[in-house]
Amino acid sequence: MEENSQEELVEAQSQIWRWTFSHLISMSIKCAIHLRIPDAVHQHGEPAASLSQLISALRIPPSKTHAFRCMMRVLSTRSTGFFSVQQEEEGEELCYSLTPASRLLLRHAPLNQASLPLLHFHPAVRDYCSVLDTWLLEENRTAFEVVNGASFWDYLAGSSGPARELKGLFYDAMVSDSNLVVNALVVPTVGGRESLLFRGVRSFVDVAGGTGIVAAAVAGAFPEMKCVVLDLPHVVEGLPAAGGHPGNLEFVGGDMFRSVPSADAVLLKSILHNWDDESCVKILKCCKAAVSGDGDQRVYNMIVIDMVMSEVGSDDDDLSREIQLCFDLMMATLLNGKERNEMEWKGLFEEAGFSNYKIVGKIGPRSIIEVYP
Ligand SMILES: C[S@@+](CC[C@H](N)C(=O)[O-])C[C@H]1O[C@@H](n2cnc3c(N)ncnc32)[C@H](O)[C@@H]1O
Ligand SMILES: COc1cc(-c2oc3cc(O)cc(O)c3c(=O)c2O)cc(OC)c1OC
């Protein structure tokens, strides 16, 4: 066995500690969201909120002030980065201010991103992580099914209190993500909105488009375009009547494994990573039938927004790759889905009968892929 130096051994021990305690960091984020610590920092933080201001605003009892201070410190390191910490003079109180990450957790932030962490702290999602060892040794079921007795999608369709709560958090998380992505898809220009992806497109279907955030933005930007959101009946039920949607947007309840309404362009955003290869090919074949036109000379296409896994040693930074790997593990354990590298995407498109594809852009760790019938 290879002998390690004392220094290497100590470093290895620290590495084990770091990842053992990482759940305490996640749980501190949950606590910060629930207690609205970012809002308290925001309200008292001109330019920064002192620890005692926060303690009094949040009504932390005296017996917990040390623990609160520890938590604020953990959330303010260079690697967690939820708050930045300053000390005017030595011996003076520490003061905290918001960072871009905690600004996204402010209650009324237009692009609030609190719902994804809250979704993953919900017992039905949180608990599946603790059975990975037994789950890995058995066939077929997802870890989510082992703990909750139903697939993720069937569970979300349920009517129990926890299922309704999880459904709310899941679709809120999808809305918060879509609100961020919309800005990258439909670019504001002087006097209007524009998008190369939608140039010449007369009709558009967002396949499994959830509550319609992306389709509503596209419909609003292009009033002449007929836009449709296809999703499961229980998801789109009541949405058209909810109001506030552009008149050129329609919601259709259906099953993307059976058929997709015909259109010039269809979008699959954060869909294919939920499914195994066989299921993806079925969905893609329905999308191909939808964008195959009627033999005219128009340009039809499908847009896929999902991760293209970077290869080891690629230019992608470590954080991007780590996020991709975590999503891959999450998809494998929660849904039997996966993130894919470029060769895997190419294989799927070919098997579904598409003629070509092009990766046309990136949004954080995800890519925008145009796929041609
Ligand atoms: C990860 S979410 C993505 C939603 C949306 N595209 C977005 O990015 O916000 C996956 C979506 O697939 C929908 N879905 C699952 N099974 C479906 C099916 N058989 N037919 C249509 N939609 C389905 C879910 O209801 C959910 O809205
Ligand atoms: C909210 O921001 C993102 C969400 C997802 C995302 O998250 C999920 C969480 C689940 O518990 C189950 C799921 O099926 C999913 C998704 O399918 C899914 O796409 C993904 C994102 O980027 C890849 C998000 O943006 C950061």
Image (cartoon, helix red, strand yellow):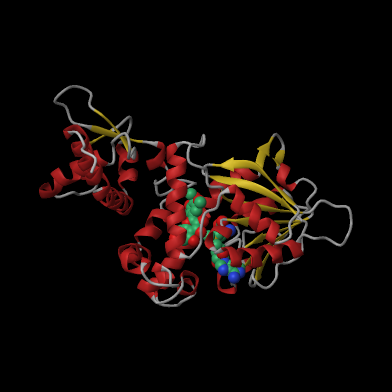
Relative to residue 279, is residue 265 depicted above or below? Answer: above
Q: Pick out the residue farthest to the left.
A: 63
Please report the residue visible at 43 percent of the width from the left and 56 percent of the height from the top.
Answer: 329
Q: Is residue 131 visible?
A: yes
Q: Residue 337: give x, y in percent of width and height.
A: 51, 62
Please report the residue visible at 46 percent of the width from the left and 69 percent of the height from the top.
Answer: 152
Q: Is residue 119 left or right of residue 133?
A: right
Q: Is residue 212 left or right of residue 151?
A: right
Please report the residue visible at 39 percent of the width from the left and 77 percent of the height from the top.
Answer: 149
Of residue 103 and residue 279, the one placed in the foreground of this image is: 279
Q: Quadrant of the C terminus?
A: bottom right
Q: Pick out the residue farthest to the front.
A: 1
Q: Residue 213: give x, y in percent of width and height.
A: 59, 55
Q: Residue 86: give x, y in percent of width and height.
A: 26, 28
In the picture, residue 99 is in which quadrant?
top left
Relative to residue 121, is residue 342 depicted above or below? Answer: above
Count of residue discs: 0
Q: Is residue 113 visible?
A: no
Q: Quadrant of the N terminus?
A: top left
Relative to residue 296, is residue 80 depicted above or below? Answer: above
Q: Is residue 201 left or right of residue 85?
A: right
Of residue 65 and residue 277, the one placed in the foreground of this image is: 277
Please report the residue visible at 14 percent of the width from the left and 50 percent of the height from the top.
Answer: 61
Of residue 40 and residue 314, the one placed in the foreground of this image is: 314
Q: Pick out the residue farthest to the top.
A: 89
Q: Residue 142: give x, y in percent of width and height.
A: 43, 69
